[in-house]
């Protein structure tokens, strides 16, 4: 059943429709039957506007975490516990499908497919409980079931609601290297596959539905793009098809001036540049996966961050060149669970090749560095706290004296031309003068000022900074209307 004919206007090369939009829906947008029904209504609205959508969905909320728990239990020999988690997930997916799909035949075939997938998952878990070794390759296979199931249920639900949806296995399109659990896409192959498999469907006025996050290497072995990778999938497909827009649908109204759970008066940012959004994503903003922006930047495709629970909200638009903002900052992000590593080498610091030796150690352990500060005899770095820290410190101790401390937070303030604003650093640190600052980075980027503090002080720092810099926000960039008190009708 179809909602009616749609005319897909083609671009000059006769390939991709000019009105093509890639719509990625996160876990909370497909978490249950009600959420999937809302998602279907949103897609119907885009079709009514003459758009040609490609749909990318995450696993249902919390499913990936539970699949990882099942994998962990099986790897420890707890076969019963692993299969119990799988059984609960099976029931959840069956219940959602039964609630969404009224057609007896469609419902029966969807539930049967769900059972087949879980039978396959249970076999993998039983084998893992015997082997007692959870390799990255097996972990990717197990967590892939979340998106493989959600995309099937969403496809059936769309068809039930009159959308001509067709399921596409993302593993046949997104091709990666073999770095399991955080695979890197092979752009040229992925673009070719996307055009070959998705464009014919679009020209037949069908709506492709695929899972995000999951992919496969060139041998066809399942890989994943890392946690949060569904956003990345949406951007990859959008870039491959030269989409008109990439829409990231989540459960917040867009990019905010700060985390609204910490600052209840946080404002929605109406428009922001690719560069600013990428900084915020990397330094802790949860709305976007850090890699999301890259494919969009390459093709100059606008990205919209929208709320599936409040579809009327215009969200945040991310474009190559944002309008000038009268306010000094656009947003404040925070990255927690970091550690500071202090390296003191009084005799070797300025020796040729010393810094390269030091960073080679971080490369060896595949540990990214967030911030670096140097003095005459020491280097301080911030890194994600992880299990490799003792090994990293042991290797570094061959070069210098080393100590490290955990429970740190990196605060990142993003805005345009921060480096060119006189006195801005004084204003920032005056606002948090009651908080001890461990490391400072300004000047490395024109749009970013960052500093390291104790994790326990992070929320207080964010509130103080927000109060200092967002009292008179620029209405051209921020949704100031949301801050105005709503008029109450006393007659009601």
Image (spheres, rainbow, N blue to C red):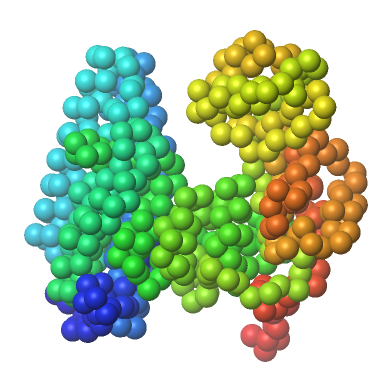
Q: Where is residue 347 in the image (x, y as percent from the top left)?
A: 78, 15
Identify the residue at the far left of this view.
Answer: 105
Image quarter of residue 153: bottom left
With respect to residue 430, does 44 lie above or below? below
The correct choice, above or below, for 161 with respect to 67 in the image is below
Camera-nearest residue between 141 and 1: 141
- The quarter of the picture where residue 439 lies is top right
Q: Which of these two is toward me, 332 or 112?
A: 332
Which one is in front, 326 or 228?
326
Q: Is residue 203 above or below residue 379?
A: below
Q: In this view, does 448 lie to the left or right of 276?
A: right
Q: Nearer the viewer, residue 353 or 95?
A: 353
- Of all residues shown, which one is farthest toward the front? 352
Percent of width and height locating residue 94: 24, 48
Q: Give the residue displayed 20% in from the left and 67% down from the top.
A: 199
- Do we see residue 262 in this rendering? no
Residue 446, placed above or below residue 397: below
Position of residue 354 measured from the top left corner of the image (x, y, whole percent): 66, 22
Left or right: 375 in relation to 446:
right
Quadrant in the picture for the N terminus: bottom left
Residue drawn at x 24%, y 76% is 13
At x 50%, y 23%, the residue is 364
Q: Position of residue 397 (x, y in %)?
A: 67, 12
| Visible residue check, residue 269 | yes
The image quadrant that residue 106 belongs to is: bottom left
How many numbered discs? 0
In which quadrant will I find the C terminus? bottom right
User: Does 120 sit left or right of 31 as displayed?
Assistant: left
- Identified at 47% across, 62% down, the residue is 297
């Amino acid at each position: 059943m179809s909602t009616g004919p749609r005319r897909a206007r083609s671009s000059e090369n006769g390939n991709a429709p000019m009105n093509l939009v890639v719509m990625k829906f996160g876990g909370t947008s497909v978490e249950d039957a009600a959420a999937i029904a809302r998602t279907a209504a949103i897609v119907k609205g885009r079709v009514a506007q003459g758009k040609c959508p490609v749909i990318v969905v995450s696993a249902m909320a919390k499913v990936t975490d539970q699949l990882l728990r099942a994998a962990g239990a099986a790897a420890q020999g707890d076969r019963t516990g692993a299969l119990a988690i799988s059984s609960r997930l099976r029931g959840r997916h069956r219940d959602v499908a039964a609630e969404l799909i009224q057609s007896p035949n469609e419902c029966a075939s969807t539930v049967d497919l769900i059972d087949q997938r879980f039978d396959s998952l249970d076999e993998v878990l039983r084998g893992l409980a015997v082997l007692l070794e959870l390799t990255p390759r097996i972990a990717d296979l197990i967590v892939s079931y979340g998106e493989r199931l959600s995309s099937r249920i969403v496809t059936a639900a769309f068809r039930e609601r009159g959308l001509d949806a067709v399921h596409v296995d993302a593993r046949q399109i997104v091709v990666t290297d073999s770095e399991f659990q955080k695979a890197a896409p092979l752009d040229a192959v992925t673009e070719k596959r996307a055009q070959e498999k998705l464009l014919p469907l679009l020209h037949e006025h069908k709506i492709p539905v695929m899972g995000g996050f999951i992919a496969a290497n060139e041998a066809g072995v399942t890989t994943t793009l890392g946690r949060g990778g569904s956003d990345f999938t949406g951007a990859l497909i959008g870039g491959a098809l030269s989409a008109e827009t990439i829409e990231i649908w989540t459960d917040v109204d867009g990019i905010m001036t700060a985390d609204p759970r910490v600052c209840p008066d946080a404002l929605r940012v109406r428009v922001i540049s690719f560069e600013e959004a990428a900084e915020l994503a990397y330094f802790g903003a949860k709305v976007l996966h850090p890699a999301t922006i890259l494919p969009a930047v390459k093709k100059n495709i606008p990205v919209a961050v929208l709320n599936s629970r409040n579809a009327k909200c215009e969200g945040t638009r991310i474009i190559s060149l944002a309008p000038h903002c009268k306010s000094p900052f656009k947003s404040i992000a925070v990255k927690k669970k970091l550690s500071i590593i202090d390296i003191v080498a009084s005799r070797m610091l300025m020796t040729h090749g010393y810094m390269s030796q030091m960073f080679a150690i971080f490369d060896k352990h595949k540990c990214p560095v967030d911030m670096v500060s140097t003095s005459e005899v020491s280097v301080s770095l911030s890194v994600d706290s992880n299990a490799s820290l003792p090994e990293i410190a042991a290797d570094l101790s061959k070069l210098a004296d080393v100590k490290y401390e955990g429970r740190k937070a990196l605060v990142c303030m993003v805005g345009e031309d921060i480096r060119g604003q006189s006195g801005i650093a004084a204003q920032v640190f005056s606002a948090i003068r009651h908080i001890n600052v461990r490391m400072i980075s300004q000047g490395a980027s024109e749009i970013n000022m960052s500093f390291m503090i104790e994790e326990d002080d992070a929320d207080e720092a964010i509130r103080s900074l927000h109060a200092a810099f967002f009292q008179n926000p620029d209405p051209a960039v921020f949704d100031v209307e949301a801050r105005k008190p709503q008029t109450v009708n006393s007659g009601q």
